[in-house]
Image: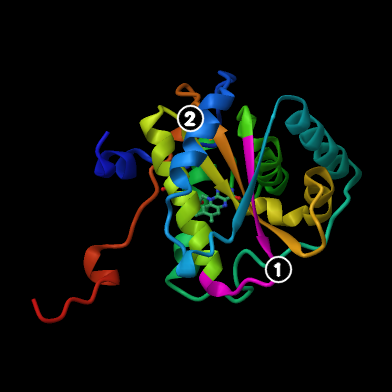
Amino acid sequence: MKVSDALLSRKTVRQFSDKPVSEETIRDLLEISKRAPSGGNLQPWTVHVLSGEPLATLVADVKEKLLEGALEIPEYNVYPPDLKDPYRTRRRVVGQQLYDLIGVPREDTPGKLRQLARNFEFFGAPVGMFFVLDRQMEIGQYADVGMFMQSIMLLAREKGLHTCPQEAWARWPETVSKHLDLKTHEMMFCGMAVGYEDESAVINKLASERADFDDFVTLKGF
Ligand SMILES: Cc1cc2nc3c(=O)[nH]c(=O)nc-3n(C[C@H](O)[C@H](O)[C@H](O)COP(=O)(O)O)c2cc1C
């Protein structure tokens, strides 16, 4: 597969089939993705990969907490509270496209919350990853982890797999830390669902937009 095909076919999948992903596939994904660059070659990531029973136990734990109405203090704000335009509009548009696609009306807050809660089932994926950093790290190292994650997401395409990166898990830092047995200096930054796309699921038809070239590129000297 060409890199451009991997890039163009990557999309966020939010409904996976129950086809399992082998340990060998996961090992291969991570062995190759570890070639991702990092400033100073720090490789500031560790990754916890859950499948089978450990994944089911975590999902059941969070589900129970959601039913009780329990909340945790999020690990971090995923978005700035006063998100400016054009970012605010982009976020609203993609959200609206998603809810339109699955038939959740604008005013149906419980419906939206049910969809949000699907994050905490890894959208039915057979594998859930968590990317962990030492709390000592700075902004530069978060970029490194992002590159590591994108490497995994692109390589997943070569293997016929799809992914959903999930900052939503930042809402459950205590529960996730407990299940992963994290030390206090470790921070779970982001989750990722990995598996095969449920091709019959309408939610996976979402085609997110991108800004035009001239809106984000400044060329000089050409
Ligand atoms: C770091 C990161 C975190 C994300 N967190 C979530 C998430 O928690 N839940 C979710 O459904 N999508 C999540 N997304 C997916 C984005 O919404 C998605 O990438 C964006 O809308 C563009 O769509 P595309 O990935 O299909 O091209 C995340 C994406 C990134 C890069």
Q: Nearer the viewer, residue 85 or 145?
A: 145
How many numbered callouts?
Answer: 2
Residue matched to label 2: 202
How far apart are the alpha carbons under marks 1 and 2?
Answer: 39 Å
Give residue 48's quadrant in the image: top right
In the displayed image of the protein, which residue is found farthest to the right? Answer: 68
User: Looking at the picture, which amino acid does disc 1 mark?
Assistant: Arg
Residue 4 lies in magenta, yes or no?
A: no
Q: Residue at x 79, y 37 (%)?
A: 58
Give residue 135's quadrant in the image: bottom right
Callout 1: CB less than 8 Å from ligand 1: no
Residue matched to label 1: 135
Residue count near mark 2 (Cα–Cα under 10 Å), binned few <14, some 14–19, many ≥20: few
Q: Is residue 129 above or below residue 1?
A: below
Whole-percent x, y for residue 157 in the image: 39, 34
In the displayed image of the protein, which residue is found farthest to the top? Answer: 19
User: Visible in this render: residue 195?
Assistant: no
User: Looking at the picture, which amino acid does disc 2 mark?
Assistant: Val
Whole-percent x, y for residue 2 in the image: 24, 38
Q: Give the mark nearer the N terminus: 1 vs 2.
A: 1
Q: Secondary structure at mark 1?
A: loop
Q: Secondary structure at mark 2?
A: helix
The residue stretch that appears in magenta: 128-140
